[in-house]
Image (cartoon, helix red, strand yellow):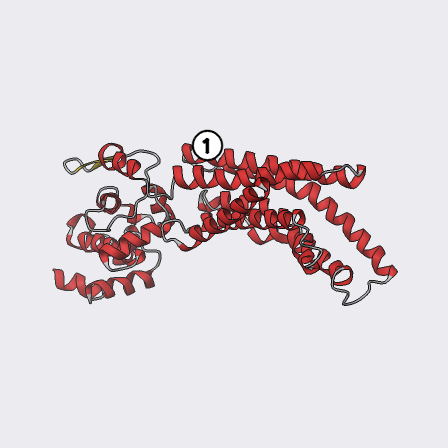
Amino acid sequence: MIYTTLLNIAIFQGIVLGLIILKSSLFNSNSNKHLAYLLFTLSIILLNHVFEIEEAFTPYPFLRFIDHVEWVFLIPAFLFLFIINRIDDPVKSKQKGYLYFIPFAYSALLNITQDLDYVAGIYTIPQSGLNLINILGLIHLILAVTFIPFLSLYSYFMIRHIKNSQEKKWIISLLTIVSSFLFAWLITCLADLFFQYDISSTMSVLALSATFIIHWTAYIGIYKYKLAKNKDAIYNFLNKDLSISYTNLQIVENNTPEEYRESITADNLYFQKLELLCKDQHIYTDSTLNREKVAEKLGISTGYVSQIVNTITGDNFANYINQYRVEAVKEMISNSEYENYNLLTMGLESGFTSKTTFYKTFKKVTGQTPNEYKNTSK
């Protein structure tokens, strides 16, 4: 059957794509991992639909445990966390990610409790317990009609914090498509609950919509923008989109460069750009500088930032940045303009966050404490 085949292809693609995002150093980031979990969730929903079409629940009733869990509660949660992890740290830090999984946990616990009676037959829920289950079921319904629309709308509100206009555009499109799917699912379920409509055809359309979301995410979000090894895009990037002038140390860049996985050497353009950002713009003086901020400046993933730094320098990202900070302090010590600065002030000006970190790193790099270095440099 063509319809079932399409669903199986989408399930396979969603699982493989999710694993690639989680395992690849190029793709993996705090933001992208939630996109991977979103793809896994859609794959599980489609798999349950295939089980229903193939009537697998009759010979294998325990599959009902998976089917009865409302996996759809995870979709707005993972999508919201995908968005929130792509915005500025001050906004991100105010979010309590675990709270958005409470409706799913509540739903799973409620349905598993019932299935231990109806499916597994481990115990029988007494009449008084059934009354409580009905009340909890009403709360479950209220959660569905409030949580899903609220988090979808809240996600639109949070997108305004994303700075990259091209990235913002495709994330808005993704959110719109997924939100439309969620609202359609919610309306269909309410119609079935209150009016006993035959929703089989509508559910088939929703299943096809889920396959479209998986395919679209793969093409637009991954292949076209960020995560594919696209030879044509690399050629354009190397020859047109990024020009490096060593005379004036200025960088002209395209807003959405493609990542690539050629052999990483010292002439890697992303590493050259990072070197110029440190030498020319002194980004290391930002005490809150981290891989995420550098990745945003370079237009690549945090995993790829680590990969190029580790491969070329043989050291990790933190030590690489601290090397520049130590050199900045050494220059201040030898510069008469800073003779009125004490050593701690020099360290903080160079991007160190505390006296302990400054002294420990300085000695690790130079073999001397800042005081010893200052005395021997006179």
Please indicate whether residue 266 sits to the left or right of residue 72 in the image. left
Please indicate whether residue 262 sits to the left or right of residue 106 in the image. left
Residue 290, above or below 202: below
Please indicate whether residue 354 sits to the left or right of residue 312 in the image. right
Please name whichever residue, 213 or 312, is drawn nearer the observer in this view of the structure: 213
Q: Is mark 1 on a helix, strand or loop?
A: helix
- Residue found at x 62% / y 38%: 206
In the rendered image, the quadrant that contains the C terminus is: bottom left
State whether residue 75 appears in this view.
yes
Tell me where residue 26 appears, x and y as whole percent. 36, 50
The single residue placed furthest to the left in the displayed view is 378
Residue 369, above or below 78: below
- Residue found at x 69% / y 53%: 68
In the rendered image, the quadrant that contains the N terminus is: top right
- Residue found at x 77% / y 36%: 197
Tell me where residue 356 appears, x and y as whole percent. 33, 64
- Residue found at x 50% / y 47%: 14
Amino acid carrying mark 1 in the image:
Lys
The single residue placed furthest to the right in the displayed view is 127
Q: Count every numbered label the image shows and give the total.
A: 1
State whether residue 153 appears in this view.
no
Q: Name the residue under label 1.
A: 169
